[in-house]
Image (tube, helix red, strand yellow):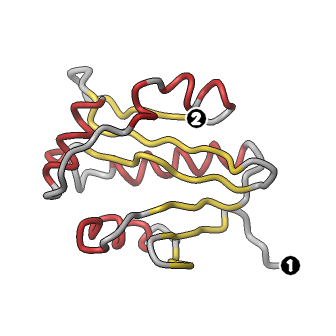
Amino acid sequence: MIFMVLQAKDALGRKPGLNEDLLNIRENYMDKGDMFWLAIDDADRVVGCVGFSRIEGTTEAFIHRLFVKASEKRKGIGTDLLKTAEDAMRSRGITVSRVHLGTPREQWFESYSFYPAKGYHEYEPGYMVKMLVDTQP
């Protein structure tokens, strides 16, 4: 999985760096009651990942590490991973999904187009939000 994430970053022209939380998924996500998923292809290779972590004391969570292998993009994998994470958040009573996209915007151009297409909107530079429940009466 780590190799896939590094490849995905490299394909975007970013300097690949290691995300420390990925070194121990169980400790950084599962043991805290949060979740993390891998998308696996027919050859049992990791082609995508996503996780979320609850914001303590709220009904909100942050999406983390939504990556799809460069050669597998535009096949619905990212959309499916995001839907899986959002559905799991809803089932745990989470009503707001947030994502930190990073700056500068030019380095994260895919995220800045992907998330708005999925119902997210920017609430401050580098951050987007989506309500997971309908708040209309």
Q: Amino acid at mark 2?
A: Met
Q: Which residue is mark 2?
A: 35
Viewer-closest of 56 and 46: 56
- Secondary structure under the numbered disc 1 in the rendered image: loop
Reply above or below: 10 against 113.
above
Q: Give whichever of discs 1 and 2 has the lower sequence position.
A: 2
Q: Secondary structure at mark 2?
A: strand
Q: Calculate the distance from the C-alpha at mark 1 to the C-alpha at mark 2.
A: 30 Å
In the rendered image, residue 128, in percent from the top left (x then y), is placed at 52, 70
Numbered circles on residues, count: 2
Q: Is residue 78 above or below residue 134?
A: above
Residue annotated with mark 1: 137
Instruction: Tell me the amino acid under the disc marked 1.
Output: Pro
Residue at position x 34%, y 72% in the image:
113
Q: Which mark is residue 25?
A: none
Q: Quadrant of the N terminus?
A: top left
Residue drawn 29% across the image and 31% down it: 2
* Percent x, y of residue 126: 44, 71
